[in-house]
Amino acid sequence: MGADSRPLTIEALPPGLYEMMLPGQGADGDRQTIRATFEPRRVEDIQFSYPRAEFERVRAVSEFNETLYEQLVSPYVRATATPWGAEWLKWAHPMRWTCYAWSGRFQPWLSPLSAIAEEVTSARAVAPSDNMWRSLEQAMSGMVTGALQATRSARDATAEMAFLWLYGQPWLPVPAHRDNPTQCAEKCCQ
């Protein structure tokens, strides 16, 4: 709530980092309302634990791979790269050529589709709420949304398990680094 007791929206806050505080609940007629306040915070105030040793291993593997690439692959790429080859690679990208391959410029028989699309767009009408196809669409949309969310959750869990299996093993050495963040004495790194 603002100083003049009007509700404060998030959009009214100045740019910055805030913590939403939920100190208590109050009754507002039939429904429960929660009085939220937003306390300004700094990045240093955010504390969370994360697998520091695993991320150090990731850094070490990344630096090793970068060194390997710079010494073994990069000289050949620089020697064989030409402006003509770069232009060819640009136009050979699948996202670019598939768009052009299905355009009216390369497929003349698709030209009438633009006229049909304009006519369909101009004659659009909202289906009534009791339309069988509309309810089927909503049910299918809900099922697809649920499947996508379950797939995303499974993907995230699998990626996290793979990360911990690969980088959480003690057999992967972590070389000393001159600006090793594990030596950080700051409050945010503890």
Image (cartoon, rainbow, N blue to C red):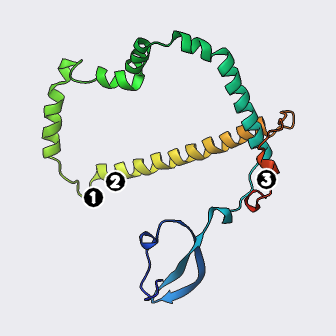
Please give the name of the residue rendered at 56% of the width and 43% of the height, measured from the top-left corner: 151
Residue 30 percent location from the top left of the image: 46, 87
Q: Secondary structure beneath disc 2?
A: helix
Residue 33 percent location from the top left of the image: 50, 82
Marks 3 and 1, how far apart at CA: 63 Å
Q: Secondary structure beneath disc 1?
A: loop
Please give the name of the residue rendered at 60% of the width and 69% of the height, measured from the top-left corner: 41
Q: Name the kind of residue labelled 3 in the image.
A: Cys
Q: Nearer the viewer, mark 3 or mark 2?
A: 3
Mark 1 nearby-residue class (10 Å; few <14, some 14–19, many ≥20): few
Horizontally, residue 60 falls left or right of residue 145, namely right
Q: Secondary structure beneath disc 3?
A: loop
The residue to which callout 3 is attached is 184
In the image, residue 54 sits, relative to residue 1, either above or below, namely above
Mark 3 or mark 2: whose residue is earlier in sequence: 2
Q: Residue furthest front?
A: 178
Quarter of the image for residue 114 reads: top left
Q: Name the kind of residue labelled 2 in the image.
A: Ser
Mark 2 or mark 1: whose residue is earlier in sequence: 1
Marks 3 and 2, how far apart at CA: 57 Å
The residue to which callout 1 is attached is 130
Q: Which mark is residue 135?
A: 2
Q: Name the kind of residue labelled 1 in the image.
A: Asp
